[in-house]
Image (cartoon, rainbow, N blue to C red):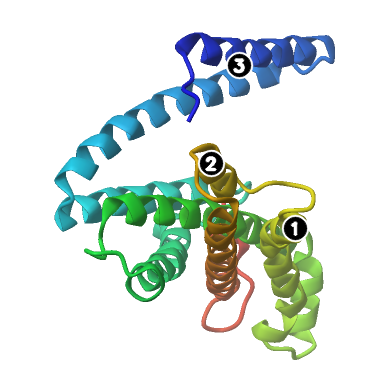
Amino acid sequence: MIHLSWLDLTLAASLLVLLMLLCVVLGLAAMNRRILIAAIRTVVQLLALAWVLKWLFAQAAPGWVALIASVMMLAAGYEVMGRQQRRFRGWWGYGMGAGAIFSSSFVITLFTLLVLIQADPWYMPQYAIPLLGMQLGNTMNGISLGLDRLTQSAWQQKEVIEARLMLGQSWHETIADIRRDSIRTGLIPIVNAMAAAGLITLPGMMTGQILAGSPPLEAVKYQILIMFLIATGTGFGTVLAVFLGAKRLFDERERLCLHRLK
C-alpha cells in the first residue's frame, strides 16, 4: 500500500482553495465559509476517529464498541434533524430520525455481523464500526431527504390536504401521494449508486480494499454485500421515518397540524 505524506494532503487541500476562489468569481462567496467549516470538520473528525479506532482495536471490548456505536447513532440522528428545512418541534424533531436510524442501521449491522460475516467475536471493532458507519451515512441521507420532502410538500400543499379532509378522506388518504413521493426521494441516491456501481463509479469500500492489496474479486464480493445491506437499511429507515412523520402531521381528530413544524 502506498503511504500518503502530510504534503500530499496539503496539496489536496489546495484544490479546495481553488474551488473557493471560483465561488468568489461566481458571486458565491457565502459558500466559502461552509466549505471551510466542512473541510476543517473533515480533518478534525477523521483524525480523532483514527486515534479512537486505534485504541478501540487494541481493546476489543464489547462495552466500548457499544459506546462508540451509540455515539455514532446519536450523532446521525442529530444530523438528520439539522438537514431539514422544516423539522418537527420538540423531541419529535430528533427522536423520529434517531429512532428510524436505530431500527434500521443497527438491526442490519447486527444481522450482518452475526449471520453473514460471522466475525469471532461478533463485536470485533474492525468489522462492527466500519459496517455501522457505512450504514449510518447512507441511511441518514435517505431519511433526511425523505423527511425534508414530506414536511416541505405538506407545507406547500396544505390547502389541498385540508380540502381533501373536508371532502371526507382520512388523513392516511390525503397524505398518501406525498408520502410515496417522499419515500421515493429518500431511495433515489442509493438506487442510483447501485445502478452506477462498477460501470460509472467504483464504490469506496471496493476501491479501498483494492488499494490495500486485496484480490479484486474478494473486494467486489464485499462491496456487493455492503451495497445490498445499505439499500435495505436505507429503505426500511426511510419508510419508517416518513410514516412516523406523516402520522405526526395529524392529530387524533385527523386535523392537519403544521404548527408542529418549525
180 to 209, vertically: above or below: below
Q: Which residue is mark 3?
A: 12
Q: Is residue 83 visible?
A: no
Task: Name the secondary structure under disc 2.
Answer: helix
Q: Quadrant of residue 179?
A: bottom right
Quarter of the figure with residue 167: bottom right
What residue is shown with label 1? Answer: 192
Crowd around label 3: few <14 · some 14–19 · many ≥20 (10 Å): few
Residue, x 61% and y 60% (percent of image)?
Answer: 147
Q: Nearer the viewer, mark 3 or mark 1?
A: 3
**Frontmost residue, 224 versus 41:** 224
How far apart, in angstroms, are the residues tagged by discs 1 and 2? 21 Å
On residue 30, which mark appears?
Answer: none
Q: Is residue 135 visible?
A: yes
Which element is circle 3 on? helix
User: Which amino acid type is shown beneath numbered disc 3?
Assistant: Ala
Horizontally, residue 235 falls left or right of residue 60, namely right
Residue 208 x %, y %: 53, 41
Instruction: Measuring from the top left, give residue 100's x and y in whole percent.
Output: 46, 66
User: Which residue does the image show at 24% across and 64% down from the upper left?
Assistant: 120
Q: Position of residue 67 (x, y in %)?
A: 22, 51
Is 5 situated left or right of 217 in this image? left
Mark 1 or mark 2: whose residue is earlier in sequence: 1
Label 1 is placed on what type of residue?
Answer: Asn
Horizontal side of 173 relative to 43 (left or right) equals right
Q: Residue furthest bottom?
A: 168
Residue indicated by mark 2: 208
